[in-house]
Image: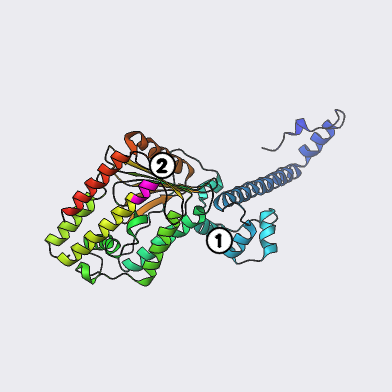
Amino acid sequence: MPPKLNVFTLKTNLRPIFISFFETKPFLLRLYKRCYFIIKEGRNKKMITEVLNNNLIEAMRIRIPDGTNLANVLMDILYIGKEAVYRRLRGEVPFTLAEVAAISKSLGVSLDQIIGISSANTAMFNLNFLHYSEPLQTYSSMIRRYAEILETMSGDPKSVLSTASNMLPQAFYLKYDYLSRFRLFKWMYQHKQVNCVQKFSELQLTQELIDAQKAFVKANQDFRTTNYIWDQMIIIHLVNDIKYFRDINLVTEEEVEKLKEELILLLNELEEVATIGMFPKTRNSVNVYISNIDFEATYSYAGTENLEIGMIRIYSINSITSLDKAFCKSQKDWIKSLKRFSTNISVSGEIQRIQFFNTQREHIKEL
């Protein structure tokens, strides 16, 4: 409401004159009230715009790596000149709705964060669903997108990647032809609406997908510190899957032997990493834990000081992901809590390490 007339900051001897003037001319009083509301509304809109602009700029700075020029990033996203970008960063020109949408899509900035909505019970997730009409193309795009996200963090000296897994890590099996094809084949077979091959031998990966898988593996191994927590079933699940498809004649005995050979090579690689406590090529630190309890799913967290992402594996080959800070903290804390039930076999824990890998080799022999 506009201020009342009897509180005008006028001298006592002038106040009665003003009151009398407005009382004799009511249209001026209505005009005064209308002008007051217009001015107040304009100020409020300006304040809201400034707050939203500042929130957006702050959210963008959090999403880009240290040392990256935000203006250059915005020029690439919005296709506008440098001066136009700086006018927006200075608050002289507000970002349009279309520009905010483009920024949100490119940098993963949550609109809830921009408008100031915060709740401990809500978070924005990317479900990363595959399109059934073009499974290979969408799967390739998904793997490439994961690789690009990890690449933005992996070069950071404080980058950390942690995974608690009940299946073989993608960062290892995606480099193997038969193993990577088998995972995809299993998913495609489960979804009858997918127009796909009927037998494992018919599934061939595109070069685009092979390149995306290589990029994903490299991005994983470029993290300065990696923590793996594996449950005791990481091999036996895959062995049982291979047995099933062999029994229904969708995988031949020759293909089973190829899968078996790659599994042995993969297991040898895992044992080497656990023994030396690092990736041989990058020399980046790796901590491997063996859990004494089973996991319901595969949980992952990747982060630096300025950017983090949480992932939960779903539907065999893909994950739901989120950049939400509360979710990432919860994911990070959950993975950390699982170490309480686990044994460190990196460098130390030699007896437990030998027992674990010998047990996994016995499972492979069942094929």
SS category of the residue bearing label 1: helix
| Residue 169 image offset from top left, x and y in percent | 33, 52
Q: Residue at x 22, y 59 (%)?
A: 260
Foreground disc of the pair 2, 1: 2
Instruction: Note whether 139 is above or below 291 in the view shown.
Output: below
Q: State which quadrant residue 15 falls in.
A: top right
Dividing the image into 4 quarters, which one contains the C terminus? bottom left
Eyeballing the image, is 174 above or below 356? Answer: below
Quarter of the figure that contains the N terminus: top right
> Which residue type does callout 1 highlight?
Ala
Give the residue pinned by disc 2. Answer: 331
Residue 190 sits inside the magenta stretch: no
**Disc number for residue 98:** 1
**Mark 2 crowdedness (10 Å alpha carbons): few <14, some 14-19, many ≥20:** many
Picture coordinates of residue 324, whole percent (x, y): 47, 46
- For the point 37% across and 50% down, the residue is 273
Q: Residue 165 at what x, y percent from top left?
A: 32, 46
Q: Which residues are magenta?
A: 272-278
Secondary structure character of the magenta stretch overall? helix
